[in-house]
Amino acid sequence: MPSPNETLVRVRAFSLNRGEVLDLAARADGAAVGWDFAGVATTGERVVGVVRGGAWAELVAVPASQLAVVPDGVSDAEAATLPTAGLTALRSLELGGFLLGKRVLVTGARGGVGGYAVQLAALGGASVTALVRNVETSVPGAARVIDRIADEFDLVVDAVGGETFAAAIEHVAPGGLVVNLATGSPDEVVSFRAARFDRAPGARIYTLNLFDELPRMDAAKSLGRLADLLAQRRLTAPVALEAPWQELDHAIDTLLNRWIGGKAVLHVG
């Protein structure tokens, strides 16, 4: 049963995140897993939300502070891509401050977080560069698409980690910010030329984990803003795979092997 500050939601779709999938091996059998979902609340409203565990289910109890109404015209699959990817992208850009005219680099720009970060930064008036493996790939919202970092940037949203994170540190502008969202391996060592970072006085590195950030942001309001942008078609949801929940194993393999860019969404029921 939900607590007084929670809403019970019947899940209709959930999306996969690389972090939660990689975390599965450390979870006990029968543990409640899954972060992102879209469904129908007991009030009858279509909603989207995020939880620390339990979204991969038919029913989930959600704090009202982590839930928003889904507008007409937004599908369950589109809504289900929003919580972790959309909120992480939005929070990363908020940390960078006023974006108008700023040079923004997004690494891993074909992924869920990266795709939303590019589009949101462009909506904020930034000049956005998308870093991808294949420069033949189109990235909605990007002014440029590159496969190697060469210029300086006022804000870097790094959704890759490793050598890419190191390169981003070396190319941050004075007073700029690198927001790091990913690490390829817990044992990964990141090295960069100190002089390349020292030449950018006032530059900072911020390590972001969404669940640590939720108390610092109005998640319900932010989710609502993102859902409205989807309804207005000012944002495009990065749905790359849709399947029934019974194909979870295939969706996990697809995600871990990077066979798709964007988000895998599974439908329940």
Image (cartoon, rainbow, N blue to C red):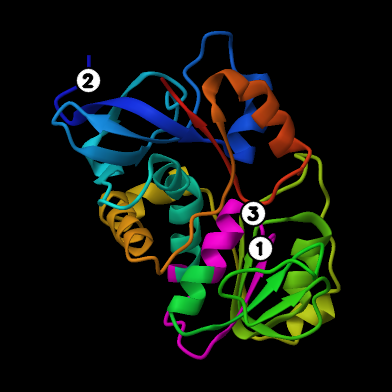
Specify the amino acid type for callout 2: Pro
* Within-10-Å neighbours for mark 2: few <14, some 14–19, many 20+: few
Q: Position of residue 136 (x, y in %)?
A: 79, 69
Residue 5 higher or lower than 152, as above or below? above
Rendered image: mark on residue 109? 1
Identify the residue at horizontal 68%, vertical 51% (top origin).
Answer: 261
For this orientation, the residue located farthest to the front is 73
Residue 74 shows in this picture: yes
Q: Give the label, 1 or 2, closer to the camera.
A: 1
Q: Quadrant of residue 97?
A: bottom left
Label 3: which residue?
Answer: 111
Q: Nearer the viewer, residue 187 or 167?
A: 167
Secondary structure category for the residue under label 1 = loop
* Within-10-Å neighbours for mark 3: few <14, some 14–19, many 20+: many
Identify the residue at horizontal 52%, vertical 83% (top origin).
Answer: 126
Q: Position of residue 50 (x, y in %)?
A: 39, 38
Q: Nearer the viewer, residue 233 or 219?
A: 233
Q: Check contact, mark 3 vs mark 2: CB within 8 A.
A: no
Q: What is the distance, in whole Å, between disc 1 and disc 3 at their CAs?
A: 6 Å
Which callout, 1 or 2, points at the residue further toward the start of the chain? 2
Q: Position of residue 96 (x, y in %)?
A: 49, 74
Label 2: which residue?
Answer: 2
Q: Nearer the viewer, residue 42 or 51?
A: 42
Q: Give the label, 3 or 2, closer to the camera.
A: 3
Q: Does residue 194 appear left or right of residue 238 in this picture? A: right
Which callout, 3 or 2, points at the residue further toward the start of the chain? 2
Q: Does residue 161 appear left or right of residue 269 in this picture? A: right
Over which residues does the magenta segment extend?
94-118
Q: Nearer the viewer, residue 125 or 190?
A: 125
